[in-house]
Amino acid sequence: DTGVSQDPRHKITKRGQNVTFRCDPISEHNRLYWYRQTLGQGPEFLTYFQNEAQLEKSRLLSDRFSAERPKGSFSTLEIQRTEQGDSAMYLCASSTAEGIYEQYFGPGTRLTVT
Amino acid sequence: AQTVTQSQPEMSVQEAETVTLSCTYDTSESDYYLFWYKQPPSRQMILVIRQEAYKQQNATENRFSVNFQKAAKSFSLKISDSQLGDAAMYFCAYRSAKIGKLTFGTGTRLQVTL
């Protein structure tokens, strides 16, 4: 059973550019979550999906951020017109939707905006 | 809104000794779950232990145990027989039974010394 994978692991971009990250959840998990973690802080929730449906979005998710999970499997998180404040680790997690549904995290994508 | 507070930014413990990490939370709900996650340096976050709020018995996982005080809204983690591999950031997290997202504290960095 493979874990949650994220691609790329590191991304350096210039301010104003668009970036897209991918997350592949554990295969039998129908829930997928995105979090953002800045240095020295705990992860902050961004959004989550159950299958294809986006069930909740944080106010942190500005209009420049969009997430999709078109076929209920992998998900993408796109940031348009990146700003230096977007520099962070972007974490993906997945879970089932039953019981306590523990969330399993991927290794993250570290974004640096120069 | 739920909040999670970890008041100890850093802790240190000698190998083979016991250490307790503190966590308090604020919620108006009665049905929820609490978690401790471990994040080693440059490695992904892994679940250490979980506690269902409706259970009075404190959870244990090998050398890890919790002291869950529901009335006081306290959820501390005790690590017994500390090992060098326990060195990491530890995050306390809360999840309502109604919704999927995790709310994290700011973390406690644990150092393990010889």
Image (cartoon, coloured by chain):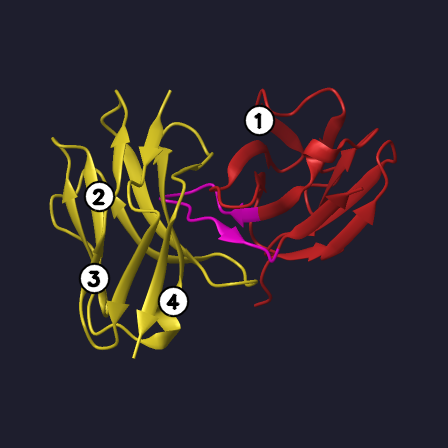
Q: Nearer the viewer, mark 1 or mark 3?
A: 3
Predominant SS of the magenta segment: loop
Q: Is residue A83 above or below residue B66?
A: above
Q: Are marks 1 and 2 on the same chain?
A: no
* Front position in the image: A34 or A14: A14
Q: Are marks 2 and 4 in contact (CB under 8 Å)?
A: no
Q: Residues within 10 Å of mark 3 (few under 14, many from 20)?
A: some
How many callouts does the rendering have?
4
Q: Residue at x 86, y 36 (%)?
A: A18
Do marks 4 and 3 share a subunit? yes
Mark 1 neighbour class, 10 Å CA radius: few under 14, some 14 to 19, many 20 or more: few
Which chain identifier belongs to the yellow chain? B
Q: Are marks 4 and 1 in contact (CB under 8 Å)?
A: no
Of labels 3 and 2, earlier in sequence is 3
Provide the residue designation for mark 2.
B75
The x, y position of residue B54, in whole percent, is: 18, 38
Question: Residue beneath label 1, please?
Answer: A55
Residue underneath mark 3: B19
Magenta-colored span: A93-107
Figure colour of chain A: red
Q: Is the C-beta separation of discs 1 and 3 under 8 Å?
A: no
Q: CA distance from mark 3 to mark 2?
A: 14 Å
Q: Which residue is mark 4?
A: B87
